[in-house]
Every structure is written in structure tokens, then in C-alpha cells.
Amino acid sequence: MRGLGKPVEQAGCRHRPGRATGLDPSFGPPHAGRRANGANLSVPIDVVQGKSPRPVYGERVRVRGSYPHEQNSGGMTQRTKNARPVMKAVVCREPGVLETVERPSPAAPAPGWVRLAVSHVGICGTDYHIFEGKHPFLEYPRVMGHEISATVIEAGDGASLAAGTPVIVNPYLSCGQCVACRQAKPNCCTNIKVLGVHTDGAFCEEISVPAGNLYPAKGLSLEAAATTEFLAIGAHAVRRSLAGAGARALVIGAGPIGLGAAIFSRIAGHAVTLLDTSAERLQMAAERFGFTSGIVASEGTAEAVREKTVGDGFDVVFDATGYGPSMEKAFSFVAHGGALVLVSVVKDDIRFSDPEFHKREMMLIGSRNATRADFEHVAESIAKGLVPVDKLITHRTTLADAPRDLARWAHEKSGLIKAVIRVGG
């Protein structure tokens, strides 16, 4: 089918295209980790662009620009006794170039903020897009990473989290004042900044975030906790659909976001069918997650939908492809009185037949990011054993190996569902 010809991996680019900023709240109060002129305070250790150069470690390292607290000598730097501790971070310097660098660790947290030791961070489709230069309006260099679990190091005044507390990080930094925030919808804040996208994220050893963006990881391993954010995207879409138990649901796109939507659609009591261009992905979904009802996209997709629903169409359709033609085709799969939820975002205009839309009296719903309620629902569902996290995580790496592995996985996606970087923990 022409409307579903794009690879499903594009579904990962779900964050609002917007002008990225140079501010890095994830590294602490203003100016932490930045020179006054905006240049990165980073010590390159290793660069990945094709083959990786040999890493350089040691007390003295060649830098591009010195820390303010360092003294330069012949192109080399020596840290002074009063320097803040440094940490390692993986930076996407420009499309196709990943560097492991040293940066100052976050300063003591400001009031209401919390300094964290990153434990695990998932690699999202957005991260691959940033690496490949496909994310619109993104400002390089960028420390990626927004699917985060961590433990508390210290809390600023007014934040009550104790040191050592394991937490899930909500990476959506909202303003708290706009029309969306005033309606308790910080996930679509008009001034939102997503860690790892609009500002630096968690491909590093430590970050600082507002205390209100942290949720307890009770009963979860820190590796499992790092899957909460991407699963919350699907859980939010299901909640937005308003579809009740017994509804027939079609999830288009069997990538990580689509699988998350399918899992939480099933938890909501829906009868789930998956639609994808890849028979291999559908087979994987059946074997790993029990989604045995599947449709391989082809010229006969419309007829297959009619057969699955006795001619009615699906009560709710979730499109998680990130591909405009697929999103347009999805309208025709919705039953009269049903709903279409667009989980992913594209830059394209989406066109549809108004007579077909109106005769169905269908709902068209946009779903963006997730809220605290969704994060908590996901964490509770994982703790209850309703989400097979061990089957979702197919690839693992460390912060040291992440530049090499992320570059490889950006192109070698066979068998890949979710990759997780172990940073600490």
C-alpha cells in the first residue's frame, strides 16, 4: 500500500519541531558547563565518524578551548585544585559525529532542582534522527538522551527527595505559566524544552532537573525505569482515545512507540491488531508480545481491514509511523463513530476527505508526549508485570561504547526494538 511505504523507525521523532536553545538546564544553573561566549566547555576524548580514533585518557588532555578554572600550557590543560569535578558525556558535535568528552559536573542544585546520577538512558528514534541530521531546527552540538532513570545525589532548597532515591525522569521541561500549563497539560506547553532535544540531555553521568519532573521508581529496576518515558507516549495516546474496554483497535507501525501503544491498548481491554510494512516486525510482535492479529501493508490492506472488522472498520486507530501518507490513509480504517489518534508528528500537511470524515462523525485526536498520570500508569503496569520490559530491551551498551554502538544501530535495525545505555547503577 502506497500510504505505508516509509520505514516505521520514523515514528520515533515525536517531539515538537522547534528552535533549539543553547541553554543547558540539564547541566545545572545558568552557565554551568558553558563558556560566557556560548562555546562548549568540553574535553574531547574520543570521536566516532566511521572508524573511531583511539581514545585518549589521562590527567592532561588536548582541548578545544579551556575551562575557566584551567591554566593553559602549550595547548595542554592542567586542572586546578578549585575546579568542579568533571564527568563524561557523549556529544553529537554535528550530524554523523559523536564525541565522548569531559565536562564540569552540575553545580549544587538551585532551589527546587535536584542533582542526579544518571543510571540508564534509552536510545530513541529521535536520537538516531539527531545523529543522522534529520531533526528539524536542532542546534548542534547536543548531548542527547531523554529516556532516563537516575538516583538522587542532592536536592536544592524546597526539594524533599533524599540522596540515593531512585527516580524516573520526565524530560519535558514546561514553563508552568502558558495556556496549556494552566490547564494541567504541561506535555504541550507552548514553551516546552525536551531534554536531549531542545537542551542537553542524559548521555552523561550527571544532570540537574526540577524536582517536579521526578517520579519514584518504586518496585522497578533502574533499567526498566528507563523505558517508562517511551512507553508513556503510547499510554498517553490510549488515554486520549477515550476508547473503552472491548474496542477494536488498530495500531499502525510496529516500532517502539507503536508497540507501546499496542501494549497499553491491550491493558485498556482493547482487541489489538497491528499493521506494518514489515512481515518480520509483525512476526516479532506475535512471538514476543502475543499480538497475533496482524496485517502486512499492501495493495490489499483496505480489504484486510474490512475482513478483520466484518466491514465496520476499527473503533480506534493509532498511527505511530511518522509518515504523512500513512496518516492520511488511516482515516479510511476508522469505523463510524470511531477515533483516529495521531501519535507521531510530521512536518507535512495532512489532507483528508471531509465527506468521509463527516459521515463517520469520527474524532481526530493529536497526542503529544505524556503527563505525570501516564508515567505513573506505566510504572505501575511494569511493577505488576503487565509490560514485558525484558522483551522490549533488545540491545544494551555502556556510555563508553555508546558512540560506536549508536552509530551502528542507526543503520543496522534488524531485531532492534529498544536499546539502553548503562551509565551508572
Image (cartoon, rainbow, N blue to C red):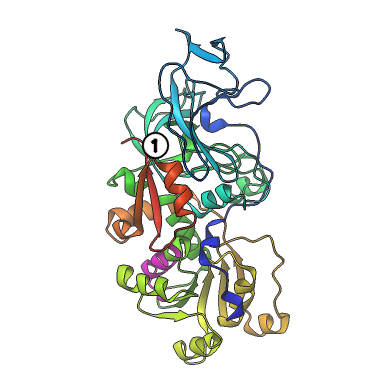
- Is residue 270 within the magenta segment? yes
Regarding residue 336, the answer to whether it shows in the image is no
Front position in the image: 397 or 187: 397
Amino acid at dot 1? Ala
Image quarter (top left, top right, bottom left or bottom right) of the N terminus: bottom right
Label 1 crowding class (10 Å Cα cut-off): few <14, some 14-19, many 20+? Answer: some
**Residue 333 appears left or right of 272:** right
Residue that numbered label 1 is attached to:
400
At a point 48% along the width and 39% down the height, the residue shown is: 213
Front position in the image: 10 or 409: 409
Front position in the image: 311 or 61: 61
Read off the magenta span. Answer: 260-273
Instruction: Classify 369 as above or below 325.
Output: above
Quarter of the image for residue 349 reads bottom right
Q: Position of residue 262 (x, y in %)?
A: 42, 68
Q: Position of residue 47 (x, y in %)?
A: 50, 36
Q: Position of residue 87 (x, y in %)?
A: 44, 26
Q: How many marks?
A: 1
**SS assignment at label 1:** loop
At a point 43% along the width and 33% down the height, the residue shown is: 54
Regarding residue 400, the answer to whether it shows in the image is yes
Instruction: Classify 344 as above or below 170.
Output: below
Q: Position of residue 64 (x, y in %)?
A: 59, 23
Instruction: Classify 102 as above or below 20.
Output: above
- Is residue 362 within the magenta segment? no
At a point 51% along the width and 92% down the height, the residue shown is: 311
**Residue 190 appears left or right of 91:** right
